[in-house]
Every structure is written in C-alpha cells, then in structure tokens.
Amino acid sequence: MRAWREILALTEPAARAFAAGLRDPLAAQAAQLKGILNAARDSRWGRLNALSEIESIADYQARVPISDYEAIAGDMSAVARGEAHCRFPGRPCFMETTGGSTGGVKWIPWTEASLAALQRGLLPWLHDLLRARPGILRGRSYWAISPPRRSVDNATVVPTGMGNDARYFGDALAARLGQVMLVPAGEDWRADLPRWRRATLLALLASEDLSFVSVWSPTFLTDLLDFLDREQAAILDALARAGHRRRAAQLAAILARGEADLAAVWPRLDTVSCWTEGSARHYLPSLAARLPGVHIQGKGLLATEGMVTLPLEAAAYPVLAIHSGFYEFLDEAGIPHLCDDLQPGQCYEVIITTWAGLYRYRLGDRVRMQGYFEATPMLSFEGRAGLVSDLCGEKLGEDFVARVMARVMRVTDGGAGGFAMLLPLAHRRCYLLVVDAVERDEAGAQAMAAACDTALRANPQYALARDLGQLGAIEAARVTRAWQRYRDFMLARGMLLGDIKPPLLGTQAGLAAALGVRDGPEAVPA
C-alpha cells in the first residue's frame, strides 16, 4: 500500500538518528536531561528547585530527590485544573489517566515536547518493524492505543486523552496511518465496554486484508477470539446486517470447519504486537496456537508516563529509548545507576525524567539488564516494584514469582501457559494457586501447586516459613473464566483496560470473593 511506503520514508530520519545514538547512549541521555531542565527552569517547580544552576547529571541527582506520585499529586491536580507553567512550560495538550495495582487514578500530562519525545522512540520502532516485516505493507492494521474507558473528573479543564490515536505518531504520520487503520482513529466506546468489544471484533472480521495488529495484552485478542467461538451465529448475522454479506458467508464456511482457522480468516496477517514479558508471557502460547505462522513482537516497556524501551527486530530484548526521556535505575540497595553502569542479569527499578513534569519519578516497574545492543542496554520487563505478598515474613516479590511460574509451567505443562495466580489467604496462612478450570484439570492443577510450593523454597524466607509451619502448602483452585473475572474486578476498581496486566500475585482486597473463592476453613472455587 502506498501509505505504508510513505510511512517508511517519513520514519527514516528518526530511525537513523536513533541508530546513531545507540553507540553512545550516555551522551544521548545527557542531552535529554539538559534539554528537559532548560525547558523547565522558568516553571514554578523549576524556579523552586533552581534548575538553572544545575550543570551536570550529578548536580541533578544531588538537588532533586526521587519521588512517587503521592509527592506530586497536588501539582498534577493543579495542571489538570488548568494551571500554566507549573512543572513545565505552558499547559499540557491533554491529560492521560493511569493507575497502579492498588492505588487510585493518576493524572499524567502530555505536552508537545513529551509527544515529540515519544515519537523519537515510536518512529524508529515502526520503521524497523516495517523494514523487517514487509508483509505488513500488504494490508491494513488495527491499533488499540487509547483505553476504551477513562476516568472522568469534572474538576479538570484539560482534555483527557489524545482523541485520535494516530496523532501519537505526529501529524505528518497521522494522515497516512489513518489510511491503513481499520477502525476510525479516536473511536470511543468508553460508555459501553461490551459494545466496544463487539464493534472491534466486527471491524476485524470485516477486513480480509488485515496485516498488522497492535494491542496491549495477548488476552485482548484471545478474549475476542473466545467471544467469536461462543457467538459465531450472532456475530456473522451482525456482520451481514452491517453490509458485509459476502464476507459473512465466507467466514461461515471457514468457521464451519470447527475451531476458527484464523490463517484463512486473515490470510495476510503478518505480525501481532503485544506484551510478551512479565506475567504476559504465560498467555503467549494460547495466542500463538490460534495464530500459527504469525510473528508476535513484544512491545517493550511503554507506560502512560512515557516510553522506556522499544523493540528492534535485530535485538534479543527491547533497548533503552535513549531519546525519549532521562532514565536512572535503582538497584536492590537503593543506589541509582545510569545506563552505562548496569550489570547484566541484575534487576533495577526504573526512575524516569520526562518533558512533561516528571522528575526522578518512580515509575513502579522493574527491569532486568540483558546485555547490550551496540552500546545501549537491553532491558526486559520483570514486574511491578514493591508488589510483595507477605503473610508471615516470606516477602514474595512479583519478579521472583514470575520466574518461578515460568519454570513450573515448562515442567508441568510443557509451557502451554494460561491463567495462573498466587492468591494469599490470610486466614488459612497459605497461598492458593488459582488456575482456569478449562485450561487445567484437577490433577494438573494439583501438580502445578505442588511444583510451585517446591520452587518457591528458593526464597529462604518462604522455605523457613514453610518449615516452621507458619505457612501451609500451596493449595489449588480451578476457577471458571478466571482471567475475565480478574479483568472485570480491576475495571470495577477504576483501572483502565490497557493498564490491566495478567496477574501473578493477587494482593488486592476483595479479589478472592470476585474469583469465587473464600479465605475461611476451606477455599472453595465457585
């Protein structure tokens, strides 16, 4: 398609600049920090912290403390209410919302400068992908970028959300991307999530030339495909009534063969972009089984606050987005490191400084240093920092549980993946391994629970608690529609669909009841 060719040409300068920076990432990072601080020095926050006097990275680290959202919530509320020059020049273009696993809504501003920084990562990624996967150029694409449901606060005067997802790539690319996007950019179903999901599936099925899909989680697609399996007749009838009678008849013949032959449904589908790291990796086998022959590319770490890493086809792991912000990495001792001072194999918590008023901000994500691409670190997403379950001193962290789950699944089911979550039961003083009742039978669930119990003993505190009888052995519970129940529970708590990652540790109050289990004398699946 001509639009794709034009996109390739328009993204080439950014790709070249990014490639050149990979050879000296610290210089690129120093330039980012200098630009951010120079732009912000006349803001209220900049004057308060004397940004004009900062001459080096060391000065910045000495003068500006590491902070979390609670420390800046007042400023973010002021920005949302329309205050100008609060933490950056002028006012934001829009606010975006996000939320953590346990906290409430967080308001994140986006400015012209922070959008440009995002594009300095998005454009090199897109150029690299299109060059490596030319099959994408043969069809149209589906993108899920903005969440279908956002929090609304009547006290804010700054718009919420971009309104047109293609504009995240800049105005020059927006028109071209609009030509190859299946669903009109900015389509908003936030008032009716089931309607939005149904409309999305209809749009995908109507397209015979779908070549590229970009979504958040692999469960986004598997949910749609499961819905298609359950509601084939109704979906095809709706497709025919929408004016796609020939396509509906074609799909009826394909689906009549049994489980959907998705290679026949979308013969041009070349690549799916989705989360592949952290807990999402357990859902990849089921997605890959439904899409044989389709290339699945991981997204890297792209948070609402900003981009941290981006995937390149030649790199084994996502690489640091050196031109999209300034990054520091806290080690286990709480010591910050720069991008040239990371040790392979070690985990770090990400600290980000952005063009939109986040300064030495704890992003809440942990990454593992996996080596270098050129001279730039490759970083895999490991899990949320600070997400720890501690019934009696065992202190199970999400990244540790993720590694245990991955090993256990390889041994017990050959890496088939699926829903698996440890749910702490305070009353019984043990953990419940929650699995999906369709994905695992009783014997398989019990075997996996026993294997988890053994593997978790690599944590000495857990081993001690088990040996002392403070913790009981892990029990198993097979729950119907486990992922969907978890997803709906988090939506009801105000989280955005795009923020909900498949869980490994279920630490939220009320989650046991939502899953149909009780923390009493018995833990009984509903």
Image: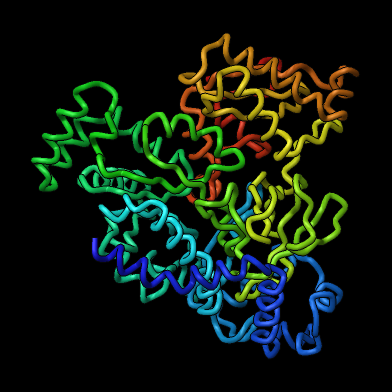
Question: Could you tell me residue 367's position as x and y percent?
Answer: 69, 50
Q: Residue at x 51, y 28 (%)?
A: 482
Question: If the image is split into quadrants, where does the N terminus sit?
Answer: bottom left
Residue at image point 82% right, 53% down: 331
Residue 386 shown left or right of residue 100 in the figure: right
Q: Is residue 167 left or right of residue 266?
A: right
> Residue at the location (41% across, 29% down)?
289
Task: From this view, report whether residue 417 is shown above or below residue 45.
Answer: above
**Quarter-of-image position of residue 206:** top left
> Who is closer to the viewer here, 460 or 288?
288
Q: Quadrant of residue 519?
A: top right
Above or below, 266 against 49 in this view is: above
Closer-to-camera residue (369/231)? 369
Query: Going 49% across and 76% down the picture, which residue do you hit?
Result: 158
The colour scheme applied to this rendered structure is rainbow
Question: How far across and down, in percent of the image, does residue 401 sit?
Answer: 70, 33
How far across and down, in percent of the image, does residue 257 sit? 21, 22
Number of marks in the image? 0
Whether residue 154 is visible, yes or no, is: no
Give residue 131's quadrant in the image. Answer: bottom left
Query: Residue 167's spot in the image, x, y percent?
Result: 39, 70
Q: Is residue 452 something one can see in this rendering?
A: yes
Direction from residue 404 to residue 309 in the image, left or right: left
